[in-house]
Amino acid sequence: MTDSILAYIQKASKKGEKLLAILLDPDKTTFEEIPVISKKIETLKANFIFVGGSFVEKGVTSVFVKKLKENTQIPIVLFPGDYSQVTNKADALLFLSLLSGRNPEYLIEQQIKSVPFLKNSTLEIIPTGYILIDGGTNSSVLKVSKTTPIAQNNIDLAVSTAIAGMYKGKQLIYLEAGSGAKIPVNLDLISEVKKNITIPLIVGGGIKTKEQLNNAFKYGADLVVIGTAFEQNNF
């Protein structure tokens, strides 16, 4: 990949090319499984591997990413649940702000805590507006962040939140139904958000079938993230 990861996503979005990321949680994947999982991800022709989780112990992410790097050339993007999960061994970092919540810890405090490391880091840092949508379950993100997700039918609020994120300078918007969500993000909600922003749109959570994956793309997602379904061998 000659472009930066953000530039690659932006170019794909403008061309209408759809991208796929596989989310791996170091809490749910052992180091011994990585060689086999890496081959499976390459078979799916995924564009990126996202790495992160809500409860990963300090230091584990670094070792996990190092092992991944030994087994695949696919770019690795950090999707951290906590500033302690940041490591230079990855290629890029989604610098997340939880826009749907009102907990300052995940709007700005975690980001400030990461700065001493990031200012000397080689990571590509991608400002990302993170918006939680109600996936019908009390996901780990909700438990950790202590925030309320946006209801699936509250499309106006989701759109306004996404636009506010764009106005604040975010380079990506990430609509997330949460790990293990019973239902994925409402397709009409995806469509309306996409119509109202000019930056790439990521969608994840609750996508369990190829039909749901294709529908997310059809309704406007530029990049779809699969986690639990991949772990359960649905793809």
Image: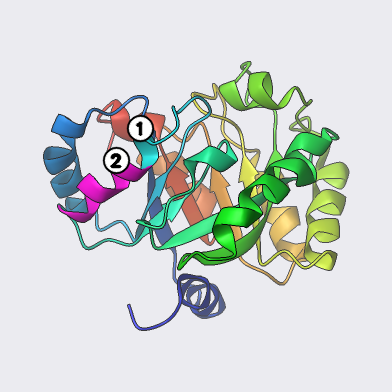
Residue positioned 58% across, 37% down in the render: 82
Q: Residue 176 — which label?
A: none
Amino acid identity at mark 1:
Pro
Residue positioned 49% across, 48% down in the render: 86
Disc 2, disc 1: CB below 8 Å? yes
Amino acid identity at mark 2:
Phe
Question: Which type of secondary structure does the marked residue at label 2 adopt?
Answer: helix
Magenta stretch, residue numbers: 62-70
Question: Which type of secondary structure does the marked residue at label 1 adopt?
Answer: loop
Instruction: Look at the image and tell me in which quarter the N terminus lies.
Output: bottom left
Can you give x and y, in whole percent of width and height, for residue 61 in the image? 38, 40
Q: Residue 64 — which label?
A: 2
Q: Residue 193, located in which quarter of the rendered image?
A: bottom right
**First in residue order: circle 2 vs circle 1:** 1
Q: Which is nearer the eye, 187 or 72?
A: 72
Label 2, residues with CA under 10 Å away: few <14, some 14-19, many ≥20: many
Whether residue 168 appears in this view of the structure is: yes
- Establish if 159 lies above or below 59: below
Can you give x and y, in whole percent of width and height, for residue 67 in the image? 21, 46
Q: Which is nearer the eye, 232 or 26?
A: 26
Label 1 belongs to which residue?
A: 26
